Amino acid sequence: MMACEFEVIRKELASKRQVVEEKIGLKLEARKKENDRRIKDLNRLKEKLIDDSKSAKIRCHNLSESVQKIEHIFQQIECDRAFSGRQLNQQREKFKQYCVLQDKIIEEREKSEAAKKAVLKRLKNEYKK
């Protein structure tokens, strides 16, 4: 009878072992599925990060080009400002020369008028005599 009891216990243990193995198998399968899902998610994130990194590099390159263009524009503005300053100085100098010429013309007219008056006065004096 002992052998029979051992046989029953063995069958029960085998049955319980099978149930435990099935539970473990199910748990392992569930873990495997969860890990596979996580791996897929991580791979998607990795791809997204790679894409983001590429687009960030492109944006950085575009920003760098924009900065260079802006610096070039500033250089042009500085050159234009310097050129305008030179032009303004030239115009000032020409205006000064114009003013000097105007003063000389006025001076010459005054001298001419004075000379005319002197000649007329002398002619009048000579005519009276």
Image (tube, helix red, strand yellow):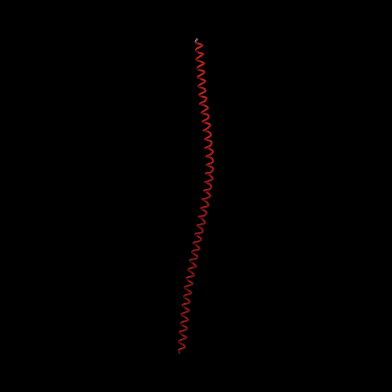
* The furthest residue to the bottom: 129
Counting labels gives 0
* The furthest residue to the top: 1
Query: Compared with residue 62, is residue 105 higher up or lower down, i.e. above or below?
Result: below
Query: Compared with residue 2, is residue 22 higher up or lower down, i.e. above or below?
Result: below
**What is the x, y in percent for residue 109?**
48, 77
Depth check, front residue: 41 or 92: 41
Query: Compared with residue 102, is residue 88 higher up or lower down, i.e. above or below?
Result: above
Depth check, front residue: 49 or 16: 16
**What is the x, y in percent for residue 101?**
49, 72
**What is the x, y in percent for residue 124?**
46, 86
**What is the x, y in percent for residue 92?**
48, 66
Quadrant of the rendering where the C terminus is positioned: bottom left
Depth check, front residue: 78 or 49: 49
